[in-house]
Amino acid sequence: MLELKIPPLLLFNIFAAVILVPAGYPIALNTVGFFTGALLLSVAVGIALVATMTFKQAKTTVNPYSFDNVNALVTSGVFGYSRNPMYLAMAIALLGVGLIVGSAVTAVLAVIGFVSYLTRFQILPEERLLANLFGSEYSQYCHQVRRWV
């Protein structure tokens, strides 16, 4: 049983709200922060889409609570660079949102909180389950590919 009861996407939205609520409005659309943030958001969406497609091709679940349907250890594509590219995409997106609204410091703090919380309550339990399912194959993968980047 996973320790985190908050779905990762909802957790992402909570941390995004932490960035957005105190942000100054209107948003300046012609700043370096805006363009950099938009670029980061684009990269995050790309990573998430590629990771999702890779899971679908492997015919395994993307649902972080449906371990009954995990039938393949995905190690190719973006999973060759990060064991958690979907969560990495969420962290990148949070940083992008913060830059867009001009709250870089708040965004960095939110990303640190998001990564710390998600690692402790979602990723570590997932890793234990995957180690039980895939044994030495998963252990070898963990030695070759970092958890985040």
Image (spheres, helix red, strand yellow):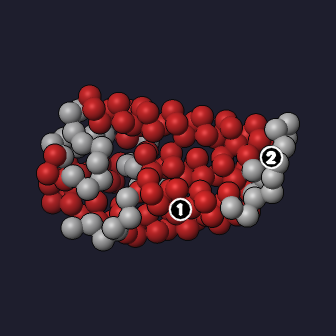
Residue that badge 1 annotates: 14
- Give how far across and how far down residue 63 sits, in percent: 29, 48
> Looking at this view, is 81 or 133 the one in front?
133
Within 10 Å of disc 1 (Cα), the crowding (few <14, some 14-19, many 20+) is some
Q: Residue at x 75, y 50 (%)?
A: 101
Residue picked out by circle 2: 27
Q: At numbered mark 2, what does the secondary structure look like: helix, strand or loop?
A: loop
Q: Which amino acid does label 1 sit on?
A: Ile
Q: Is residue 111 visible?
A: no
Q: In what quadrant of the picture does the N terminus appear?
A: bottom left
Q: What element carries label 1?
A: helix
Q: In this view, does 86 lie to the left or right of 41?
A: left
The kind of residue on which mark 2 rests is Ile
Asked if residue 46 is positioned above or below residue 22 in the image, the reply reads above
Residue 99: image location, x then y, percent: 73, 49
Along the horizontal axis of the image, is 109 left or right of 74?
right
